[in-house]
Image (cartoon, rainbow, N blue to C red):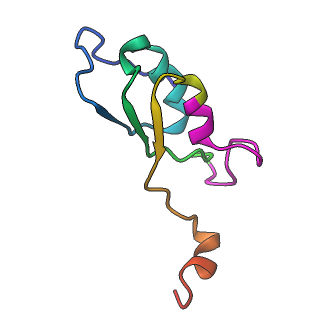
């Protein structure tokens, strides 16, 4: 997946919401460079296989937020808005 940002425009906010398909994360984070240093990055990505919606594409002992935080060592990464997949709904939302 190739992503093109408006790289001619500076990132000026203190809080950045990372709202892209998980396969695009590496490309998106590579483009702004040090502009994300010191920023709060809210990660709302979901690392799943979008073709099959099967299990997560990160290792069982890892998380997408941890991988993103590793790519942004000078930013504070916050994970948010993680939905549960349909197979888990009966455990998360009994009666539904």
Which of the pair 85/2 is nearer the observer?
85
Residue 42 in the figure: left or right of residue 70:
left
Residue 41 image-quadrant placement: top left
Q: Position of residue 46 (x, y in %)?
A: 53, 47
37 with respect to 51 (left or right): left
Image quadrant assignment for residue 35: top left
Picture residue at 51% right of the left edge, 29% below the top = 25
Q: Residue 13 placed where, x, y %? A: 24, 28
What is the residue that sits farthest to the bottom in this orientation? Answer: 95
Look at the picture and state if 38 lies above or below 18. Answer: above
Q: Which residues are magenta?
A: 52-69
Residue at the far top in the pictured view? 8
SS majority, magenta:
loop
Residue 82, image x and y in percent?
Answer: 49, 56
Relative depth, front residue between 42 and 47: 42
* Residue in the picture at 52% in, 24% down: 72
- Would residue 92 appear left or right of 28 to someone viewing this image? right
In the picture provided, is 72 more to the left or to the right than 88?
A: left
Residue 66 point in image, percent of width and height: 61, 38
- Residue located 38% across and 34% down the image: 40
> Magenta stretch: residue 71 in it?
no
């Amino acid at each position: 997946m190739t992503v093109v940002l408006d790289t001619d425009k500076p990132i000026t906010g203190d809080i950045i919401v990372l709202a892209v398909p998980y396969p695009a994360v590496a490309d998106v984070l590579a483009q702004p460079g040090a502009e994300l240093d010191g920023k709060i990055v809210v990660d709302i990505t979901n690392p799943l296989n979008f073709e099959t919606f099967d299990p997560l594409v990160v290792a069982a002992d890892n998380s997408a937020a941890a991988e993103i935080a590793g790519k942004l060592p000078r930013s504070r990464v916050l994970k948010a808005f993680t939905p549960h997949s349909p197979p888990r709904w009966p455990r998360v939302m009994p009666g539904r």
